[in-house]
Amino acid sequence: MEIRKVADRLPPGAGGVGVYGEPYETANGATIITVARLGGRRIGTSGVVAVPVGVFVIHDGEVTWKPAVDETRIVLMALSIGLASAVLATLAVLRRPPWPDLSRR
């Protein structure tokens, strides 16, 4: 399988331009090609930011795609969802407690 066919099937990202690095060969004969996407400008910087997307690994004529996973973003998203659900649950309990009203009227 040619690298161009694989690259056409896997777009690097929506809204960004894909950038392919120089291929280099490892000691075991595999060829590595890095892939990044160019993002917009960041506040306070004058240049464009390249965000890693993954790498193509070519070994024995077979091409595989290894995506780059941003674990920090995944953890921050999980913490944000947990915090939001805790706040919503607290507000729901404060507005109408689940226990019966035992005060005299």
Image (cartoon, rainbow, N blue to C red):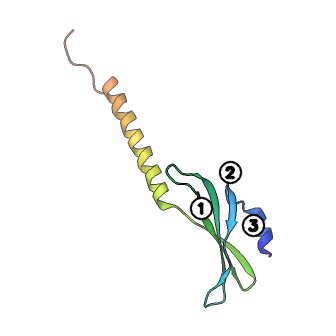
Q: Look at label 1 and name its amino acid.
A: Ala
- In this rendering, which labeled residue sits more in front, label 3 or label 1? 1
Q: Residue furthest front?
A: 46
* Quarter-of-image position of residue 51: bottom right
Q: Look at label 3 and name its amino acid.
A: Ala
Q: Classify mark 3: residues with Cα within 10 Å, few (<14), some (14-19) or many (20+).
A: some
Mark 2–mark 1 Cα distance, whole angstroms, equals 13 Å
As helix, strand or loop, the secondary structure at mark 2 comes to: loop
Q: Earlier in the sequence, mark 2 or mark 3?
A: 3
* Side of 7 where 71 appears, left or right: left
Q: Earlier in the sequence, mark 2 or mark 1?
A: 2
* Side of 57 where 98 appears, left or right: left
As helix, strand or loop, the secondary structure at mark 3 comes to: helix
Q: According to the image, label 3 marks what residue?
A: 7
Q: According to the image, label 2 marks what residue?
A: 15
Give coordinates of residue 86: x percent, y percent. Answer: 37, 39
Q: Residue at x 58, y 57 (%)?
A: 47
Q: Residue at x 55, y 54 (%)?
A: 46
Residue nearer the viewer, 23 or 86? 23
Q: According to the image, label 1 marks what residue?
A: 50
